[in-house]
């Protein structure tokens, strides 16, 4: 199994917790015609990290870097869920039974159903376990 | 009341004769320190070339930065085996300023504290709660031994746990307290919340940070004490250098032990009595660590002679600093210390801003620092680790809890010329 094709590049942007920061990031991405597929903001003690899945991560990286943002790539995986009651439970149970610990997660619901994005510590191991547990992982090519 | 009436009320001529004698002795003692030996020989001065007190002007000033050169024991004029205690105080950069005491120094120092406490009318019958830090800070043990010397019942309660402090005041019938004025305000608030009236209190000794007349009125009203201002610095033993008498209109500085000059901090020239300037002190009774014309950085002035209590010339209450030193919760902090700490942490940049606020009468310091691009992993937990690390390093170095705010690279102001990195938002106390 080609594990690598399931590894998705999330962009993580350091941001102070003050008005206008998200707008500045979103404006920059819009200018470059980069589409945001999913995103979340995590906050701690006066600062935060904006996490996003975009269609052109390299381009997003270079643009934000040129504007002075502190940006890094983070590897995540995406699991397909049924967009109906119990859909999250099905996936969460598989992960729990497989002993996979989630560092953080966020989700979106799109045309092809709902998707759970996961940051896990042992990504290769997690991919293998999720595949053998019968859940559907989305390939990198779906995003970018 | 006097502890040592003769010395506290010496006539001017006798005082000056004693000062001159002690100054010569101090110069001889200072010559045992490499730094002063060189300084004095460069200036062509020996103890015998000092004929009058005014001749002291030929001696160059000693600054706090000079003491750093001698870290740790380079300014001791006696062998280490004669040193019986060491205290430290803030340095301008990474290393603290080390001060040492011989057995005799400790005795002389305790005697000065005893003078001060007797002057404000406390004695053997009094129960004294010393609510300042006992670790390294001179205010703890300094007051402790002075109070024991006059036979007070001493409670070394140190800092923290305000409720417990209040219980002890109530249960032990404490009459006299010593702490920073801001902690005293905090104490009075907590006592009010607890419904404790602290009726046994009668005397409050407050020092280690500047405070105003309005805070004096409010402390006196809230705690039911008569409030006295206490002044000192570790380089001159510690607290006890100058103190208010019952008149509470200026501080008596002990001229037999400390030779006082007030200078214009920019020119180094003396200013006239009644004119504000930087206090420069040559301690006349220190054995382990003599100093010559030490620039305290504190701004004051010499007041007119003639106090009702008959003691000698007073200085005004300290109104500020001639340098950028900050006093936060009674602890001295130099912005250069913060810079020094940050330079050693690769995860953050070297630019910083300091904000100081007063929340419930207690000072809070916030340091803003930029995250270093190369250390951003994308993970929030790694950022939190960096934030914690910076806070710990600052606390270890400054002995002060600070709030650390991580900000984006390049977002802090860059200064050309004189940097203004400290924003003090405290209202006067």
Image: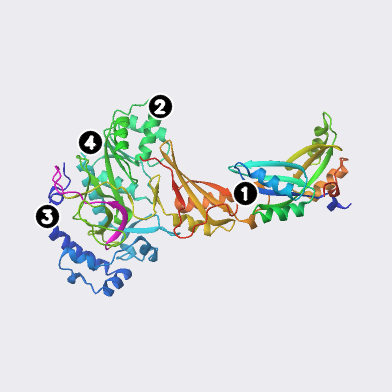
Check the image and report above or below for B295 versus B249. Answer: below
Q: Which residue is mark 1?
A: B383
The residue lying at 31 percent from left, 47 percent from top is B319
Which tag is nearer the camera, tag 2 or tag 4? 2
Residue closest to the eye, B296 or B30: B296
Q: Which dot marks residue B12?
A: 3
Which tag is nearer the camera, tag 3 or tag 4? 3
Q: Which dot marks residue B79?
A: none
Number of callouts: 4
Which tag is nearer the camera, tag 4 or tag 1? 1
Q: Residues within 10 Å of mark 2 (few under 14, many from 20)?
A: few
Q: Chain of mark 3?
A: B
Q: Residues within 10 Å of mark 4 (few under 14, many from 20)?
A: few
Q: Residues within 10 Å of mark 3 (few under 14, many from 20)?
A: few
Separation of marks 1 and 3 at Cα, in angstroms: 64 Å
Side (left or right) of B29 relative to B193: left
Residue closest to the eye, A42 or B135: A42
Q: Which residue is mark 4?
A: B125
First reached walking from the N terminus: tag 2 or tag 4? 4
Query: Looking at the rendering, which quadrant does residue A94 occupy?
Result: top right
Image quadrant for the N terminus of chain B?
top left
Separation of marks 3 and 4 at Cα, in angstroms: 34 Å
Instruction: Answer whether labels 1 and 3 touch (C-beta < 8 Å).
Output: no
Check the image and report above or below for B72 versus A116. Answer: below
Q: Residues within 10 Å of mark 1 (few under 14, many from 20)?
A: many
Q: SS class of the residue under badge 2?
A: helix
Q: Which dot marks residue B194?
A: 2
Q: Chain of mark 2?
A: B
Q: SS class of the residue under badge 1?
A: helix
Instruction: Answer whether labels 4 and 1 touch (C-beta < 8 Å).
Output: no
């Amino acid at each position: 199994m080609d594990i690598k094709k399931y590894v998705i590049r999330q962009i993580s942007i350091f941001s102070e917790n003050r008005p206008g920061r998200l707008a500045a990031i979103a404006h920059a991405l819009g200018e470059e015609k980069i589409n945001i597929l999913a995103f979340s903001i995590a906050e701690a003690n006066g600062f935060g990290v904006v996490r996003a899945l975009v269609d052109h991560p390299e381009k997003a990286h270079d643009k934000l870097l040129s504007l002075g943002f502190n940006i890094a790539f983070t590897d995540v995986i995406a699991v397909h869920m049924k967009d109906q009651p119990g859909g999250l439970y099905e996936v969460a149970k598989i992960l729990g039974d497989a002993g996979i610990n989630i560092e953080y997660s966020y989700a979106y619901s799109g045309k092809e159903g709902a998707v759970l994005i996961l940051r896990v510590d042992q990504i290769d191991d997690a991919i293998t376990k999720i595949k053998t547990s019968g859940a559907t992982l989305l390939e990198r090519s779906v995003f970018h | 009341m006097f502890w040592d009436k003769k010395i506290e009320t010496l006539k001017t001529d006798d005082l000056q004769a004693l000062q001159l004698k002690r100054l010569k002795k101090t110069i001889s003692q200072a010559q045992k320190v490499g730094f002063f030996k060189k300084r004095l020989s460069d200036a062509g001065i020996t103890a015998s070339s000092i004929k009058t007190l005014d001749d002291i002007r030929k001696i160059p000033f000693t600054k706090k930065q000079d003491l750093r050169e001698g870290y740790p024991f380079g300014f001791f004029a006696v062998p280490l085996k004669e040193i019986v205690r060491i205290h430290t105080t803030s340095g301008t950069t990474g290393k603290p300023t080390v001060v040492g005491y011989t057995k005799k120094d400790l005795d002389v120092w305790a005697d000065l504290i005893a003078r001060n406490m007797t002057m404000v009318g406390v004695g053997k019958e009094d129960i004294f709660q010393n609510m300042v830090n006992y670790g390294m800070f001179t205010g703890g043990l300094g007051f402790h031994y002075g109070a024991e010397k006059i036979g007070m019942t001493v409670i070394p309660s140190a800092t923290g746990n305000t409720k417990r402090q209040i219980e002890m005041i109530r249960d032990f019938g404490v009459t006299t307290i010593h702490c920073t004025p801001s902690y005293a305000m905090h104490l009075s608030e907590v006592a009010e919340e607890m419904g404790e009236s602290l009726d046994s209190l009668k005397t409050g000794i407050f020092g280690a940070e500047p405070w105003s007349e309005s805070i004096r009125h409010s402390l006196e009203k809230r705690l039911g004490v008569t409030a006295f201002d206490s002044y000192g610095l570790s380089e001159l033993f510690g607290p006890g250098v100058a103190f208010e008498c019952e008149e509470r209109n200026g501080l008596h500085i002990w001229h037999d032990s400390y030779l006082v000059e007030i200078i214009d901090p920019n020119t180094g020239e003396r200013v006239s009595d009644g004119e504000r300037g930087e206090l420069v002190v040559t301690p006349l009774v220190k054995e382990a660590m003599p100093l010559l014309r030490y620039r305290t950085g504190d701004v004051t002035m010499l007041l007119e002679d003639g106090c009702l209590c008959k003691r000698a010339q007073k200085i005004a209450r300290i109104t500020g600093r001639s340098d950028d030193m900050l006093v936060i919760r009674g602890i001295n902090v130099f912005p250069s210390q913060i810079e020094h700490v940050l330079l050693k942490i690769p995860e953050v940049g070297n630019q910083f801003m300091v904000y100081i606020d007063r929340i419930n009468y207690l000072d809070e310091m916030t340091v803003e620092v930029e995250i270093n691009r190369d250390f951003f992993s994308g993970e929030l937990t790694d950022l939190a680790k960096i934030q914690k690390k910076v806070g710990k390093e600052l606390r270890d170095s400054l002995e002060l809890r600070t709030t650390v705010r991580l900000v984006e690279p390049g977002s802090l102001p860059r200064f050309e010329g004189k940097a203004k990195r400290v924003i003090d938002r405290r209202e006067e106390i």
